[in-house]
Amino acid sequence: MSAVAARPRLRVGIVKMASCDGCQLTLLDLEDELLAIAERFEVVEFPEASSSRSAGPYDVLLVEGAVSTPEQAAEIVELRRKAKLLVSIGACASYGGIQALRNWSDHDAIRAAVYAHPEYVESLAAATPVSEHVKVDAELHGCPISPEQLREVLVSVAVGRRPQIREEAVCLECKRSGTVCVMVAEGMSCLGPVTQSGCGALCPTFRRGCFGCFGPREQANTASLARALKTGGCEDEEIARLFAGITGWSGPFRSIAAAYGGPPGVMPFAVPAGTEGGRDDRN
Amino acid sequence: MVIDERMPYAPYPSPIGTAVAAPPTRIAASGGGGPWFLASANLGVLIDLLREDGRTVIGPTVVDGAITLAEIRAVDDLPAGIGDDQQPGKYHLVRHGDRRLFDYAVGPTSPKRWTFPPVVAINVGRRDGRAVTFETSSIDPPRLALLGVRACELAALGIQDRVFLGGPYTDEDYRERRRNALVIAVNCTSASSTCFCTSMGTGPEARGGYDLVLTELDEGFVVRAGSPEGADLVARLPVRGADAGQMLRAAEAVGKVAATMGDPLPTAGLHDRLLAQFDSPHWAQIAERCLSCANCTMVCPTCFCSSVTQRSDLDGGVSTSERVWDFCFTAGFAKVAGGSFRSRPRDRYRQWLTHKFATWVDQFGTFGCVGCGRCVTWCPVGIDIRAELLAIAPPLSARPEPARAKPVAATPGSYATARIVSVRPETDDVTTLTIGDVDSAFLAGEFGQFAMVAVPAFPPVPISISRFGRDTIDLTIRAAGPATAAIIGLGPRDEIGVRGPLGTSWPIERAMGHDVVIVTGGIGLAPLRPLLDGIIARRDRFETVRLFYGARTPADQLYREELRAWAARGDVDVQLTVDRGTPGWTGPVGVVTQLFDQATWEGQHALAFVCGPERMMEATVDTLESRGLSPDRIFVTLERHMECGIGLCGHCQTGGLFVCRDGPVFALSQLGGIFGREGM
């Protein structure tokens, strides 16, 4: 083991865009292994833990938050240059997060409605995922991310292999844990069948439907799930609200939210481009 | 391990022993060989005995809105008076008016959870410098008593026994868990709408593979033992011999359940029927609905697939491996470096369904389905495999093709007047009439249907519709007798009577996505011309299209200009032959079958459409079958004496069929021994 441990420590940085900091705090949830992590990684930037900033370079850069302002758009390009591996962490960094709800609305109208002097507010019309701006090597999903998956990414970097993150629906976590399906048994609306696992099926375990914070899984047949919800008595508005949640700006969720009338309560201007339909034709 | 090879379901011999036990002496002395009766009030004694024996009792209990399986500590944990209402994608608890404990159909959890748990430790790997070691995880399963196991679940255990223990390599974890689990079955006295064990031959009555089996009556249980250990338990229970009335009521209750289920999924020939449908367009239709969420596989009591995951420490020095439930619906399941072999949900669904009902049989000698219905109930979008199987691989008797004739309100006398628009001679004795002012029903007619055509004073004649125009139809008629001669003798603007469209049609929809072979002779091309029109209009929906056409002489070919035009397209292979060449004919001379007796196509999936003189069709069918087409993929038309055209007059009856109404287009498989038989 000594031969392995003798390698130089890897420089890991955590930076944030528009976010709540919950995802970076997940690192601190790895309580039992923080010492081991510190042996293997030099955490050179971690806003929630230290005010010191690094100029890079980074072996691994964990990016939290959506790109929401012109400064962030410029900064992420600069950060990418300094990072060997860039990992977006969380729903905001990977899908735009809850702040992407504003993407459905007329940005200027909202600013004018909220701020007395909107001219002082510099923000982009859309909050967008990091991957729309720079190449992302890996994404960790969730709101917040799973400590286990964060650990797996760190281990894989340290060991030099691909992270083993299962591509599957939340349903598998429900069934493995023995949780009775809230959709079939209780008629709840649940995004579990189209949502990437990783949360341990947290919400269904507490008898409520999944609201998709880990984002769409591969081959997410959102069109079929939406039809089933509607057949089960869901109003269009409820369906649109459900899909336009924390990861609602992801393609498969956004298309359904648009097809069912857009998220209620926003200040609409038009259906965003690229959201026609709501059918997944890849099947 | 003794694995019973009987088909279709070999009840798993209890790990404790294979023979039904002789009743313990003191019971035998007092009450004969059973069955015994256990009063409801004494079921708790059974649970207590099991627990005293150091077993954890796993049985039915209500958790989160469903009757699921969990540890049972006392009778009060059982779902007294509670049942369920199950539909595709729906599960609801219902309250019965009684205190019965097992009056429900199976819930989302099956004994698989204990014999093949969702997560099992496999090994721990360690690396120290250059040295590596792997320590296999110990197998130390709990002593269990599985209470309330249903007949379908016993069959499922038997199936997993074959999977895990029946082959050259065995799963020791499974073996130990199985060996340590006592099985107390309960015969079903109620079924849900999603149950179909009767079709799969697994229930509702337990036929083996248990240590004890109970049948619930209002006042208690009729009890039988299936192993020495079960008999030993009986000996320690406060039982008495069941009386004749109790035995009768128990048998009636189970029989009634079987009757209510009926046979919702006929399985005769299912293996072959399903394997013939690998290219069915239906897979894509299911995938429109399928979420590929894997719920069906996880609730399935026989699905046995898994993946192994590693969790290592930060320097890779210690790595723990676990086997976890994983199934053919997940993205990674068929993945290799470079991509997934089953990236599309349609591929995953096909993999699952064909495994359950066909390839499982090849591998393990039974279906992979026991008819418990869990996959139907617990599919979030309510996909019902019974319905899908019936649609993809319908039982021969239920096959819808050829498309049935639509009922038309046409009595044998109800001719509508239509007007001849144009007359085009095809050959010396064949003429095509284009008819306008026809009833709109004709314009919506199907390819292969026919019309009854009448001029006053002549008997009406059945004529195939040889083209469906925008507001006209074509009738191609050979002067075969006075009536047809009279019709051909008419000219433009003359009126005639027509009735129809009548009869069945070529199943063009079924040919989509497949190779199409059309074989025809003489005037037989006429009813196939609309089919060719239809295929060419949607050419991209079909694979290769070939037309083999034989005529007596070059001058006897119909639609010569169109034949040239079809050939010139390049995407229809038109091959012609004649019985007798004439000067200028450079093509082959001989029977039509020589055009394709060496041809190759996707024999399993090609569809053939054949029309011509019956002798020619017989030779054609023989050749097609020799080229790999099965009788259900060969469609022929029969010509018989027809008068009414609607199956009422009896002239055209052949075997059990009215050719006018049940035909004229038939799948060869429908005709059985009729086709080509002298005197039919």
Image (spheres, coloured by chain):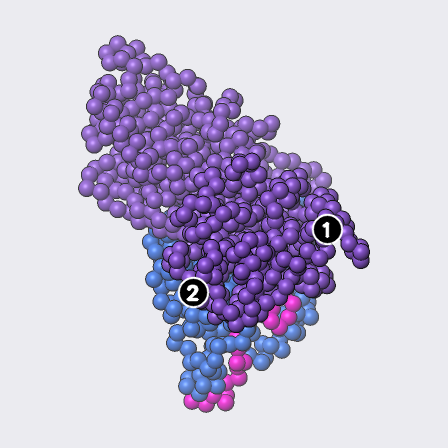
Chain colours: A blue, B purple
User: Is there one chain holding both mark 2 and mark 1?
Assistant: yes
- Residue B72 found in image quarter: top left
Q: Is residue B429 above or below residue A103?
A: above
Q: Assign the magenta stretch its main secondary structure.
A: loop
Label 1 marks which chain's residue? B
Q: Mark 2: which secondary structure?
A: strand
Say which residue appears at 69% left-offset and 61% top-offset.
B560
Q: Is residue B388 above or below residue A119?
A: above
Q: Is residue B279 above or below residue B303?
A: below
Task: Report which residue position mark 1 lands on.
Answer: B578
Category of crowding for the residue at label 1, using alpha-carbon neighbours closer than 10 angstroms: few (below 14), some (14–19), many (at least 20): many
**Magenta span includes A134:** yes
Which of the two labelled residues, at mark 2 and mark 1, occupies the earlier sequence position?
Answer: 2
Category of crowding for the residue at label 2, using alpha-carbon neighbours closer than 10 angstroms: few (below 14), some (14–19), many (at least 20): some
Say which residue appears at 46% left-offset and 70% top-offset.
A259
Say which residue appears at 34% left-offset and 21% top-offset.
B225
Q: Mark 1: which secondary structure?
A: strand
What stretch of residues is rendered in magenta? A115-137
Q: Is residue B473 visible?
A: yes
Q: Is residue B110 visible?
A: no
- Residue B112 found in image quarter: top left
From the top left corner, tell me how far across and down residue B341 is, in percent. 63, 49
Q: Name the residue nearer the viewer: B664 or A75.
A: B664
Task: Report which residue position mark 2 lands on.
Answer: B416
From the top left corner, tell me how far across and down residue B443 is, in percent. 49, 65
Q: Name the residue nearer the viewer: A259 or B367.
A: B367
Label 2 marks which chain's residue? B
